[in-house]
Image (cartoon, helix red, strand yellow):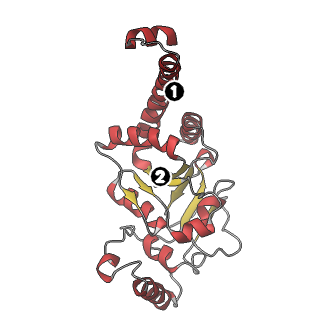
Amino acid sequence: MKQERQAQADRLTEALELSLPPIAAAFPDAVPDGVPEFEGAVPAGCVFWQEAAARTFATTAAHHALCSIGIHTHNLSGAPASQPEELGAALEAMIGLDYVREEEVAAIPVLERQAKHAVYGPLREFPLDPAVVLLFVDARQGLVLSEAVERVDGGAAPAMGRPACAVIPRAVNRGASAMSLGCCGARAYLDAMTDDVALWALPGSGLEAYCEQIAVLAGANRTLAAFHERRKTDVESGERPTVRESLARLS
């Protein structure tokens, strides 16, 4: 399985030309031997995704204590006693700003299965079967992803907004990909979420199929991009090539 995950990580990185490696997440009741607990504090659970680009680690609800929304969407057991009050205060503030409405709260995705831990790390070295794989991509990379996941899932991936962490339960619960434009919190906390970057979540259960189609469509896009660039140059220079002529010149 380790070799398979290495191959999948390499295929995704190469096909999409990722600047940040694919990140895996799993939600086990027991942490594998050799996986350390995260040390330190973070202002929000989404920060773990960025940290996981460099190393594998395990977290509990205590590590997510400053992010009541993240504890809620990840359905982590053993939440701090302050969780209901903190979550209520966060939602009250958001409702007061009309950022979230009361009837919308129940629609926020939450992991169906409660777990004791959230383990994060680079897909290439991940010690568990990933529940979800996260990709930070720009619009050009997202184009390939959108074409690939539509082929695998049989439909287009939903584009989600706040909260960014809800993209994980959406993908895991439905067994289909989802794309998050982030939220103002994630964009404040994550250096990786620049203005031109979105977050994609691929369910681990279908990862091999996604990898296969992403590789195929990335190659097709490169070839067709060269075709269109050459055709643009020819037309701008006064030529009127047929499609067959443009294809012949490409080869």
Q: Nearer the viewer, residue 182 or 43?
A: 182
Query: Residue 128 location in percent, x, y?
Result: 53, 53
From this view, report whether residue 73 is shown above or below residue 35.
below
Identify the residue under disc 1: 222
Q: Is residue 100 left or right of residue 31?
A: left
Q: Residue 111 sits in which quadrant?
A: bottom left
Badge 1 marks a residue whose secondary structure is: helix
Residue at (65, 54) in percent of width and height: 53
* Mark 1 or mark 2: whose residue is earlier in sequence: 2
Identify the residue under disc 2: 200
Amino acid identity at mark 1: Arg
Residue at (65, 74) in percent of width and height: 42
For marks 1 and 2, give the CA distance.
21 Å
Query: Residue 51 location in percent, x, y?
Result: 66, 60
Amino acid identity at mark 2: Trp
Hey, which residue is sitting farthest front in the picture? Answer: 238
Query: Residue 103 location in percent, x, y?
Result: 28, 80
Q: Residue 162 sits in which quadrant?
A: bottom left
Q: Nearer the viewer, residue 19 or 83?
A: 19
Q: Residues within 10 Å of mark 1 (few under 14, many from 20)?
A: few
Residue at (32, 83) in percent of width and height: 102
Q: Nearer the viewer, residue 163 or 54?
A: 163
